Structures are given as C-alpha cells and as structure tokens.
Amino acid sequence: MHDDLLYNDPALASFYDVENEWMDDSERCFRMAEEARSVLDLGCGTGLLAVAMAEGGKRRVVGVDPAPAMLAIARAREGGGDATFIEADARTVRLEERFELITMTGHAFQCMLTREDRLALMKTIAAHLAEKGRFIFDSRNPAAEEWLEWNRDESERVIEHPEQGTFLAWNEASQDPATGIVTYETHYQNLIGTKHYQAKSRIAFPDKAELEALLKEAGLKAEQWLGDWSGEAWGPDMPEMVVIGGRG
Ligand SMILES: C[S@@+](CC[C@H](N)C(=O)[O-])C[C@H]1O[C@@H](n2cnc3c(N)ncnc32)[C@H](O)[C@@H]1O
C-alpha cells in the first residue's frame, strides 16, 4: 500500500482534491468534531477534513498518513499549520496521546488489505481513544459490488486540473475471487495526448460480520451503523458501512 502511486506520486496526488471535494462524510465528521476537544484523523490524505476540523486552531487535530505526497498537499493548504500532520502507518502508529474523536474517511480503511491489517488498525483506534471518545470510519458494503461500475465506459470523466489543463480520467477494476481484494487502475490522460498518469491500487471489501468481530477483538464497541454518509440506517442493500462507536 505504501507503493500505491495514486498517493505517493506527487503528479497523481495533485489530482486528489480535484476529484474529491467536501462531501457528506466531511460534513458529518466536522459536526462530530465540534463536540470534541481533540481529533485524530487516520489516513488523512490531503488534509481537507483535518484542517477544517482544526477550525483555525480551536481544537487539536492530528492527521496521520504514510504518503508524503499527500501530506505535502495537506501542509501547504490554507490553514495547513492549524493541524499537525504525521507521516506514519495507521496500523502501527503510537502517539502518547488520546483523542476525543478518531476519524478515518474516504474509505482509507479499505487500504487495510488483510484481516490482520484491519485488526491492527482497530487496535490503533483503541490505543488512542479517550475514555468517552468516539470513532467513525467507512468501508464500502461488499454486497453492493461497486467495483463493477469502475470500468472505462461507466467511469470516464473530463476533469480540469488547476495547473495542468483538461484531462480525461477513467478507472478499470477486477476482483480476485479468492481474497475479495479489488485491484483498480486510475488513468489521467490530457486531452492533447502528451501526458498519461496511471496507478494500480488494491483495496479490500470486508463484510459487516468481520468488522463486528474485529471491533470486539480490539476492545471497541459499535453504537451505530449507517448505510451511507447522508445518515440512512444500515441495511444489507446499502452502499456503505459507516460505523460510529466508542471503547468496548
Ligand atoms: C482515498 S484516500 C482518503 C483520504 C482522506 N481521508 C479523505 O477522505 O479525503 C486514502 C488515504 O489512505 C492512506 N493510507 C493508505 N494506507 C494507509 C495506512 N496503512 N495508514 C494510514 N493511511 C493509509 C493513503 O495514503 C491515502 O491518503
């Protein structure tokens, strides 16, 4: 995962904010952060949410991500100095600190490819959660098989890069039936055909039963399961699993 060019190549990382804006996940986490004095944002990426949650230094926000190219964008954004950004792996990072809110958004959780990785991540949450602290993260519902839409026909889009001009973007994906891991390609090709950036990424699609077992094993407790970030309750046909909880 640390060699995923999508997050580790500065050229590809520079497309992240063009494609990912403030959405329902940021809004819900931001509202939860308003109740907290400190926030840990795991897999913080380019720091859009982390910096917003810091509200100009109103609360302590620490963002953790292993990808230097993403963190460079986070630190350079307006207000980037209001949050603390640490280059580290969420599975193993140990800060001598506890937080009232721990967030992991944008399906960063799905970068944890094995059960062992996911358990390690949940143990990181448990090790950093304050007594009455809450955590929230998301993972796509495997039953919705969203990766089936990640083919060139359905995913092709035109995007405007602020410095590099107009690009055609598309994805291609396939699932390994043995592991459930989905490998997807991301392509950015400029319209004049002189640049073609591409990355191959791997993400996992664990099911709800596994997440429930892992939370328990890590000493965490789910209080609420949402089926999407707009706040709909979870159901087997919902696109997402958004879990909100605390210490077990
Ligand atoms: C899709 S981005 C999400 C970024 C951000 N949370 C957001 O919502 O915009 C996934 C992020 O997870 C990070 N990531 C991958 N493996 C990780 C790990 N082991 N620990 C922490 N972050 C990781 C990537 O570097 C990338 O920045």
Image (cartoon, grey):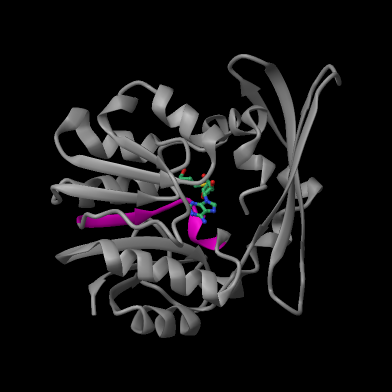
Q: How many marks?
A: 0
Q: Which residues are magenta?
A: 99-110
Find residue 51 and report its horizontal and vertical position in percent: 31, 34
Q: Is residue 225 above or below residue 147?
A: below
Find residue 102 and report its horizontal and vertical position in percent: 29, 56
Q: Nearer the viewer, residue 45 or 142?
A: 45
Q: Is residue 210 above or below residue 159?
A: below
Q: Is residue 146 magenta?
A: no
Find residue 46 and report its horizontal and vertical position in percent: 46, 35
Please report the residue visible at 34 percent of the width from the left and 26 percent of the height from the top.
80
Q: Nearer the viewer, residue 44 or 234?
A: 44
* On-image quarter of the C terminus: bottom left
Please report the residue visible at 21 percent of the width from the left and 54 percent of the height from the top.
97
Q: Quadrant of residue 145?
A: bottom right
Find residue 143 and report its horizontal and vertical position in percent: 60, 75
Q: Is residue 212 above or below residue 12?
A: below
Please report the residue visible at 48 percent of the width from the left and 28 percent of the height from the top.
73
* On-image quarter of the N terminus: bottom right
Q: Nearer the viewer, residue 61 or 15?
A: 61
Q: Is residue 2 left or right of residue 239?
A: right
Q: Quadrant of residue 82?
A: top left
Q: Is residue 151 left or right of residue 164?
A: right
